[in-house]
Amino acid sequence: MTVLLLGIGLVLVFEGLVFALAPSRLEELIKVIAETPIETRRAIGLAAVALGVLLVWVSGAI
């Protein structure tokens, strides 16, 4: 449970930094994402999930 809360907290910190430090760049990024084909967004999302699972697995093995 502690690791889960730590992970959620870190995500919120990084997301908050993006909104606080570069809100105009975030709007540009949203436009780029909206123009990206759904299949590409899905592939990027699946790659991010796979990388996340790999990182969690590796960190558990250390």
Image: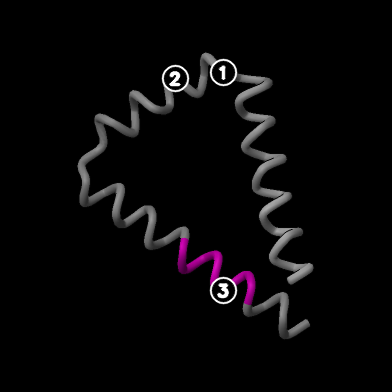
Which region of the structure is painted magenta? 49-56
Question: The residue under label 3 is which amino acid type?
Answer: Leu
- Which residue is rendered at x = 67% and y = 40% of the image? 14
Instruction: List x then y, in percent, for residue 5.
Output: 73, 60
Question: Mark 3 or mark 1: which comes first in sequence?
Answer: 1
* Tag 1 residue: 23
Q: CA distance from mark 2 to mark 1?
A: 7 Å
For the point 38% across and 55% down, the residue is: 45
- How far apart are the two marked residues, 3 and 1, measured between alpha carbons? 30 Å
- Relative to 13, does residue 1 appear above or below in the rendering? below
Q: Earlier in the sequence, mark 3 or mark 2?
A: 2
Circle 2 residue: 27
Q: Residue 54, which numbered label? A: 3
* Image quarter hosting the N terminus: bottom right
Crowd class of label 1 (few under 14; some 14 to 19; many from 20; radius 10 Å): few
Asked if labels 2 and 3 touch by Cβ distance under 8 angstroms, the answer is no
Q: What is the three-letter code of the residue carrying label 1?
A: Pro
- Label 2 element class: helix
